[in-house]
Each structure stands twice: as C-alpha cells, then as structure tokens.
Amino acid sequence: MSEPTEIRSKSVKAKVRRTVLKAGGTLLISLFSPLSALASQILAVRTWPSEEYTRVTLENDANLKTSHFIIKNPERLVVDVEGIELSPTLKSLVAKIQPNDPYIKQVRVGQNRPNVVRLVFDLKEEVNPQVFTLAPVGEYQHRLVFDLYPVNPPDPIAALIEKGQWSIDAPPDAMPPPVAEIKPPYAEPKSDRAPQVNRMLTIALDPGHGGEDPGAVGRGGSYEKNIVLAIAKRLKAKLEQHPNMRVMLTRDGDYFVPLHVRVQKARKVQADLFVSIHADAFVQPTANGSSVFALSEKGASSTAARWLANKENAADLIGGANIKNHDKQLASVLLDLSTTAQINDSLKLGKAVLNEIGGINRLHKGSVEQAGFAVLKAPDIPSILIETAFISNPAEEARLNDDAYQDQMADAVSQGIRKYFAKNPPLAKGKMM
C-alpha cells in the first residue's frame, strides 16, 4: 500500500531539515575550528652570529606575539611565540646554530601548548636580549627578531690598543713615526703644511649593509655586502702596513649594523676619518663608474645623489634596526649635527681619493658629489662614502668579484687617504674634544 501523500510530505520536510542542520553544523565547525588551522606560517629562519651580538630571525606571513624571560644557572633565554605550530622550517633552526657562535650554545624548539611554540636558547654567557618585530619591507615579509647582546661587550678602544700595543696617551717617543715622515710622493713641501702631530692615526672603515640587508644584488647574484667587506679588509691590511695607522671596521663579518651605530663606533675610537664602502646599483644596467660622496647641508648635488642617499638611508628598514631601543636624543645629535668644517675636510678627503680611483676605473662623476647620507653625519669626523662600481652593471659586477680589481681599489683608496693626511695633518686628540 502506498504511503499517504501528507505523511510522505512530512517525511521529505524532515529530511530537508536534517540536511540543513547538518550543513549548518559543518559551517559552525569550520567557523569555530581550532586556531591551529589558522596558525601563521614560518617561511624562513636565519642566524647571524658575530662578536658584537648574535641575531636570530624568524620570517613569517603575519605579525607574531611573543613573551620571553631569562633563566639563570645555567643561562637560558626562553621565548614563547603565539599563533604558530611546530613545523619543519622552525625545527631547522636547531641545525643553524654553529659551534663557533659566541653567545648561543644550542637552541631547543618544541610545542609548549596548542598554538604556542617555545624556543629555549642555551647561552654561553649572560646576555641582554632584544626581541622585536619588523613590518614587511622589500622582499621580506613579517620578521620576528632576537638580538642577543653580551652583558659585558668588548671595548673597541681596548681591542685596537691590544692590536697596536700602544696607548692614546703614550709619550711621543713611544709612538710610531709621525705623519710628517710619510715619504714622497705623498709628502708636500714643508712650507705648505701645518705643524705635525706625533700620534697614531685612526681610520674607521665602514663596509655597507650586512646580515639581513644584502645591499644591491647584481644580475649574476653577487651581494654588495660581501664585495664591500672583502674590499674593506684589503684596505685595512694596506693601511696597517704603515706604522702610524690603525683601522677599525664597523663590521668584520656578515651581520647587520644600524647606520647610527656605525657613526657611534667611529666616535668611540676617536677616528680621524670615516670611509664607507659600497657598490652602487641603478635601474639601468648600463650605468657604470666609481663615485665619491660627502655630506651636504644644503641638499643633494644631483638628482642621482639624492636618489642614492635615500636608498642607502633605507638600510635600517631592510637590515632590521630595533627603533624602539634607540636612544632618540643621541641619535638626533649624531644625525642632525653637521659642521661646515667637517664637510670641507670631507670634500678634501673625497677629492684625494677620487683622483686615485680615477686611475683604475671610469669615474661616474669627475667631482665629489654631496647628499644627506645618514652614515656621514658624524659632526667631528671627515667622512666620505665610496661607490666602488655599479654592481648592477654585468661588466662591473665581474670586476667587483675579481681579486685583482678589489686589490687595486683598496690600493687607490689607501693612497688617497695618505695623500689627504700629508696635506691635512690631524689635530692633537686633546684639541678635537
């Protein structure tokens, strides 16, 4: 016997209702599913060890919330990262800690609780950790950064004194030969020279970029940060062949140094000169030649100089400076105080170096250019920025990677510096304060 129409209609409605409820339940489950389904993804992990500090970077697709604390005896840094789940990429951090890392012995990574990963850094000594986030910039997405600074950092002046076996306040008879003893062709007639000072000359060399900030990247894959560090090390060796010169590198490895810290380092060692070394890039691969820049109080000397200064001044954003930790007042003094005397001396230094560089490479401009480079704003140190060549030009990129060209560039800059000192002997240290 067939089912009555009314009963069959009710049965169909009930089935429809059950289907709708089931679908609705599925929708509710999807809306209120565990947060793990929405967890952020760790895209990359990187480590940058150095004597000054060790940096660990987690690059991710969203901003992460963290908390951290120190455990004593033995020293450990514990970091809880919320909104992520343990992943193979995050686990790979364990293998990235090298035995020669000055501050991290090892790192342990584990799922502390749902949606929270715990990182435990076993430390080699007591550190002051800085944990901060960086917004997306350039090719980077969100970054979570751990900077581990030693509680007792090395003294840069003590390091230089140890290398040179001398003291700033040493008597003249204990010092190396004075500047006046620089031999021809660097010596000028005595009648044209200021009184000589018997003391060591300190030169701060600043290889641009480093660490998270690769600088310009050539078409062949060369990183500016690696090339300029190699040239700076060659230049350091050449300058220190002369007994009255010592050199401080603002970085001696592949790690990031904020712009204002580079200036601070030069001032801490009472540098007589500051020379920043770079390898230029431009949107057109045909651009070529070497350039030298000094600071400008009145704006850039050309549109290209302004463009380059803006690009170089953005290094802190790419490299990852912890802006919240800056001493804003000190940074303001360092980056705003400039003097006419400093700029005039910088132009003289720049001209001496440019003349020598012109002997090994085409000059992009035949005179020293000027722009508002943040790294050149030490008020009491003659400072120049050298663009050794265009890394964006395939031919010049090849030269920049050539040992012979790097050596020639270092030799040219060294001779330019010595000629500058021959004509412009520095004041006694007491008169510089």
Image (spheres, rainbow, N blue to C red):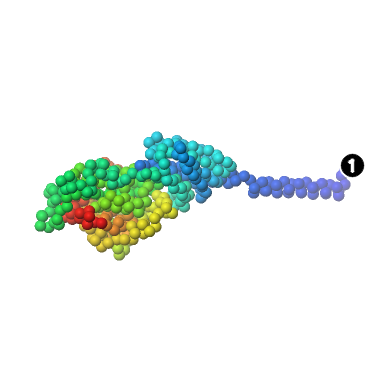
Q: Is residue 168 left or right of residue 250?
A: left
Q: Quadrant of the C terminus?
A: bottom left
Q: Could you tell whether 110 is left or right of 211 in the image?
A: right
Q: Quadrant of residue 294?
A: bottom left
Image point 62% across, 44% down: which residue?
34
The spot of residue 79 in percent (x, y) is: 50, 43
Whether residue 235 is visible, yes or no, is no
Please, which residue is most extreme toward the right here?
A: 1
Q: Quadrant of residue 113?
A: top right
According to the picture, the residue beneath numbered tag 1 turns out to be: 1
Q: Position of residue 287 (x, y in %)?
A: 31, 53
Q: Most extreme residue toward the bottom, as rendered?
A: 298
Q: Nearer the viewer, residue 7 or 126?
A: 126
Residue 207 position in % (x across, y down)? 31, 48
Q: Is residue 152 at least partly visible in the picture?
A: yes
Q: How many marks?
A: 1
Label 1: how many Cα within 10 Å (few below 14, some 14–19, many 20+): few
**Is 112 on the left-hand or right-hand side of 103?**
right
Q: Nearer the viewer, residue 355 or 67?
A: 67
- Type of amino acid at the residue the image marks with label 1: Met
Q: Position of residue 114 (x, y in %)?
A: 58, 42
Near-viewer residue (307 or 88): 88
The image quadrant where one finds the N terminus is top right
Q: Residue at x 10, y 57 (%)?
A: 191
Query: What residue is at 24 percent from the left and 56 percent from the top?
Result: 432
Q: Residue at x 83, y 49 (%)?
A: 9
Per the image, label 1 sits on a secondary structure element best described as loop
